[in-house]
Amino acid sequence: MGQTGEVGTPRQETEPLLHLAGISKRFTGVLALDRVDLDVRAGELHVLFGENGAGKSTLINVIAGTFPPDGGTFRFGDEEIRHLTPQRARAIGISPVFQEFSLVPTMTVEQNLFLGRELSTGSVLRAGDMRKRARALIDELGFDLDPAARVDDLSRAHQQMAEIAKALLGKARLLILDEPTASLTERETGRLFELIAKLKAQGVGIIYVSHRMREIRALADRVTVLRDGRHIRTLDAATVTDGELVELMTGRKIDVLFPTIPHAPGKVAVDVENLSVAGGIVSDVNFYARAGEITGIAGLVGCGKSELVRAIYGLEKVTGGTVRLNGLPYEAAEPRASLRQGVAYFPANRVAEGLALSRPIRENASMTALDLKRFVTFGVLRQGAERLLINPIMEQLNLRPPNIERAVGNLSGGNRQKVMLGRALTRDLTIFLFDEPSVGIDVGAKVEVYEFMKRLVEAGAAVIVVSSELPEVLALSNRLYVMHHGRIAAELEGEAKTEQNVLSSFFKDHLAEAAA
């Protein structure tokens, strides 16, 4: 690999590779980090664990040179670091892969990999050498990624691969991975775990941010728990239990992650017949969802499950078949008409599709209701009416802090999801489409999202949940569809709704080949 060959042998050192002591960071009115300590050893995978808003993102941004700390000391190797910038961080071997991608959409994968570190002789770019190095790195990573493809033509999973490849092109001594598997398939996740093991053996230190207990169990050497911007404890991953981690993270015991939902299936609210979507990613799908229950859709990344609910809402072009809402044909679907039909959609990518990050919480939460007469007088928005509606909704959803005039971009992932959920309470809606509802949010926020769904079902709504998290979709749904290569592979309910049956539907092609 272009990068790992440059790392060399593991560092034989007693001092940590990274040592932070008393790091503080304040933003306007918010103390994001309060005298945080952290050390990471060469060859160690160190998990940062905490609720959304605990300070994890701020801390890794300090380490990556994006934010200057307001206090404390920062040592990397044998050097005390001051006035760190992202460029200097990369130069000394700190390579971050953030949850929000930093790729230039109009450039190719190869151009993004070498952006700011182009290979040249004099003033002439060595395009052939860059192409060769990009191809060799991607091949060794095992990623299905075309170096010549434009980033804006890639799926989110392939953009994630490009970000990881970009971080590993240089001489990485410390790799930061922020929720790196959120958009990867099982196979791609397996390749990433193999790569992590190789990097650790070569002495690379890794900071890993994840809310997924299975990943922490598989990868972590130590875990540092943050809460409310403070360092709570650093623990040996081999000896701490999941329950202890969650209690340290939240400051309270969470006995039950998934609530008991009293499903009471009623009339068919959504009925899809022989539906196909442009590009063939959804083909001849038959599907229905009833009021008073959660209907789940499971499947691997790229199976068409997200495109199915996006087509129902009007975000994907339907090329064949029929959609009916409450028994009536729904043709030429588009988002505004869907809202008027009582349908809400919550996208998986809250940043790209769900929220206007520079605008306040108030505007983001109310934007689905601005066509209602109570908010507009002679074409002028009544902000007073808007505030009267949004304030109690955000209080009901436990938004922290509750100031609805804050920009959404300043919120954690869990609080951003609450702003999205708040839209569902601004108008009369009866059908709710959730696409990956828990991606990028912590355990405490997940519990609140699941309780929100429970209240919707109890009120008689039809709830459709698309999820790549198998325990989540199994626990929440009353009936479960499994998608495979754009088609429905199975419909499961009752005793048939098991992990084994779902997995056999995921991999039925491989099982059939093995049997043959």
Image (tube, rainbow, N blue to C red):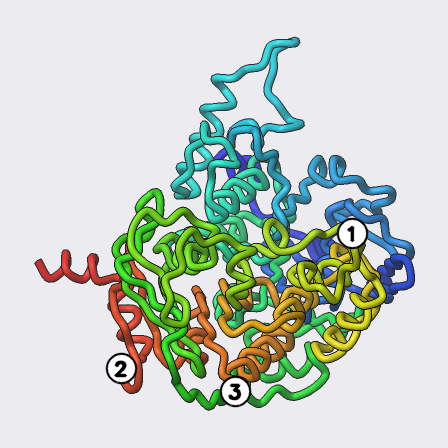
Q: Which residue does the numbered mark 3 point to in the structure image?
A: 458
Upstream in sequence: badge 3 or badge 1: 1
Whether residue 50 is visible here, answered yes or no, is: no
Left or right: residue 263 versus residue 229 is: left
Q: Nearer the viewer, residue 40 or 437?
A: 437
The crowd level at tag 2 (other Cα within 10 Å; few <14, some 14-19, many 20+) is: few
- Amino acid residing under circle 1: Val
Task: Give residue 62's mark.
Answer: 1
Upstream in sequence: badge 2 or badge 1: 1
Judging from the image, what secondary structure is the residue with disc 3 in?
Answer: helix
Q: Which residue does the numbered mark 2 point to in the structure image?
A: 496
Q: How far apart in space, not on screen, are marks 3 and 1 (Cα)?
A: 44 Å
Image quarter in which the C terminus is found: bottom left
> Looking at the image, which residue is at 44% across and 37% down?
138
Left or right: residue 17 versus residue 190 is: right
- Amino acid residing under circle 3: Glu
